Amino acid sequence: MPNIEFLSLRFDLLDQAATIDALRVFAALDRFSYLITPNVDHLVRLHADRDNAQVWESYREADLCVCDSRVLQLLAKPFGIKLSVLPGSDLTQKILELGDAPFDDIAVIGGNEDLIARLRLRYPALVWRAHFPPMGVLSDPVAQDEIARFVETVPCKLVIFAIGGPQSEVCCRKIAKRGKARSVAICTGASLEFLAGLKARAPHWMQRARLEWLHRLASEPRRLWRRYLVKGPQILSIILREQVFRR
């Protein structure tokens, strides 16, 4: 598939339709596959922990990597890097709206009973299964193993990880390494919370204007102010450092 490297990650240059087609192909394989959707926050975290091989490999070994951020796309342009953007929330919504096999039976990692109940009401034709891991999955090997066993035993062909990054990606890599699961996973952050009505997504005009981050900050200021106002701007120095180093 066409791809390009940016900030030490490979990004696949696929639109929504091509990505869904690729997921169907992966779902039919006799192995576990996974898709990741890095955004600015993911990359700031990755580069802040450069020596964490486990986390870096979980991103680099993903079968599909699509850019989730219009801001990241904009910042890449001055360096001649043209990223395709496919927000994870848009991808998840389209897959659920299609509602056809092999994605009509879905396993969710994360959330709670209320989330699953709301999803069943919105998408009654789909089969929903769920595993609710504890907090701190990234540093809890036992919880990671429980997630892996759940994914290996459910009959679903689609697994949606809703526990955020990088724990979603780390768990997916571990499942792939175990070699027992036969499904495809997507790591798409808060997508299910938006679709279930638990959180409000930014209006389309704010998404097009690359201001979705501002809407999220205004919606959850106490939880997200540090992510968007302190950590987020670090992406500028990361990009400059990486591009100068490469040149």
Image (spheres, helix red, strand yellow):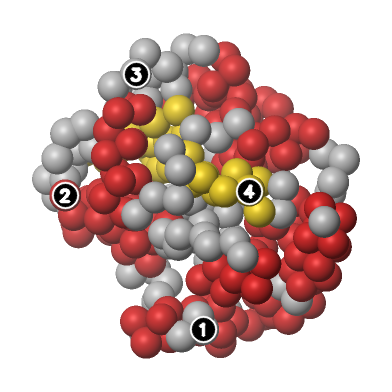
Q: How far apart are marks 3 and 1 (CA)?
A: 38 Å
Label 1 is placed on what type of residue?
Leu
- Residue at image location 34% in from the left, 82% down from the top: 204
- Residue at image location 38% in from the left, 66% down from the top: 194
Which is more foreground, mark 3 or mark 2? Answer: 3
Q: Distance between the residues labelled 3 and 2?
A: 21 Å
* Vertical placement of residue 244 versus 202, above or below: above
Q: Pick whichever, 147 or 89, lies toward us.
A: 89
Q: Distance between the residues labelled 3 and 4?
A: 26 Å
* Residue at numbered disc 4: 5
Picture mark count:
4
- Residue at image location 52% in from the left, 60% down from the top: 83
Do tag 3 and tag 2 residues touch (Cβ < 8 Å)? no
Tell me the element at label 3. Answer: loop
The N terminus sits in image quarter: top left
Q: Could you tell which of marks 3 and 4 lies nearer the N-terminus?
A: 4
Give the percent coordinates (x, y) of residue 203.
36, 84
Label 3 is placed on what type of residue?
Leu
How many neighbours does mark 4 have within 10 angstroms: few (below 14), some (14-19), or many (20 or more)?
Answer: few
Label 4 is placed on what type of residue?
Glu
Q: Locate residue 184 relative to residue 128 in the image: left or right.
A: right
- Residue at image location 81% in from the left, 67% down from the top: 240
Q: Which label was assigned to residue 211?
A: 1
* Residue at numbered disc 3: 29
Q: Could you tell which of marks 4 and 1 lies nearer the N-terminus?
A: 4
The C terminus sits in image quarter: bottom right
Q: Which label was assigned to residue 98?
A: 2
